Amino acid sequence: MPDSAKVVALRRLLDERFPKARPREQRIVRTGVPTLDNLLGGGLLTGTLTEFVSAVPSGGSQLSVGSLILSTRLTRQRVALVDAAGGFDPTGLDDDAVAHLVWVRCDSLADCWRATDLAARDPNYAVVVVDVRGYPERELLRTRDSIWVRLQRGAEQAETALAIQTTTALVPNATRRIVFAQPLKGRALLCPRAILVPTLSMELQRAHNRAREGSA
């Protein structure tokens, strides 16, 4: 048998015995906010980190998270919310709306990252939301790159969508960064959630097909 034919036969044999693993198909988790889902290409992408930057007070990020909680309740998907500094406000969400939600309140930033790491690696959760608003920017910026890399790898392995709420651009390996920079006006805040959500304004500042890994 010619050498070229032997190589082809060997490759075929190896492919049969050791088939290449197919990459996991990434799924979309809809947030229920029309503008946000359009910017995200349908919704939150599993296996990646998405950053919600609350650049101004009453900009709509909290409403968007509330809408995500309601949307995942309808689709029977479990959500974990890791609250680093007491920023999450469940006002307007009744008991049934949060029946699928695990709300973790942390005593320190270190506890926050530990809880997030555990939740992101748990395939029972479709989405893990991490709210670090309220922590000093200086302290958050000291977060090691290895922590971000570990969180991203955990989300990849468990096929979890990881959304991180911040007040400034913070996450170095975020696949998508959504900035809420238009505050809702006083009267608008009195409107029902169903009326407010479709009017929310935000912009996409980063969109990569794959989250880049920071240095460990």
Image (cartoon, helix red, strand yellow):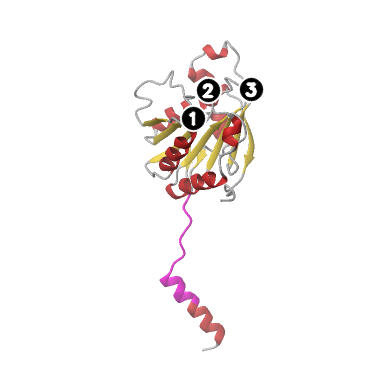
Residue 122 falls in which quadrant of the image? top left
Of badges 1 and 3, nearer the viewer stands: 3
Q: Is residue 52 above or below residue 21?
A: above
**Magenta stretch encompasses residue 24:** yes
Q: Decide: marks 2, 3 in contact (CB < 8 A)?
A: no
Residue 32 is labelled as 1
- Residue for point 47% across, 50% down: 25
Distance from disc 1 to disc 2, alpha carbons, whole Å, reads 8 Å
Please name whichever residue, 176 or 106, is drawn nearer the observer in this view of the structure: 106
Sequence order check: which comes first, mark 1 or mark 3? 1
Residue 133 coordinates in the image, percent (x, y): 54, 28
Pick whichever, 125 or 199, lies toward us. 125
Mark count: 3
Whether the residues at callouts 1 and 2 have beta carbons within 8 Å, the answer is yes
Whichever of labels 2 and 3 marks the residue nearer the N terminus, that label is: 3
- The residue lying at 61 percent from left, 45 percent from top is 208
- The residue labelled by disc 2 is 197
Residue 125's spot in the image, x, y percent? Answer: 40, 39
Q: Nearer the viewer, residue 41 or 177?
A: 177
The Cα atoms of the two marked residues, 2 and 3, are separated by: 13 Å
Q: Residues within 10 Å of mark 2 (few under 14, many from 20)?
A: many
Q: Which residues are magenta?
A: 11-25
Front residue (pair 42, 111): 111
Q: Amino acid at mark 2?
A: Val
Tell me the SS state at disc 3: loop
Is residue 210 highlighted in magenta? no
Q: Is residue 66 above or below residue 170?
A: above
Question: Which residue is rendered at x = 52% and y = 35% of the image?
Answer: 164
Residue kind at label 3, given as amino acid type: Gln
The circle on residue 211 is: none
Q: Which residue bears the numbered disc 3? A: 182
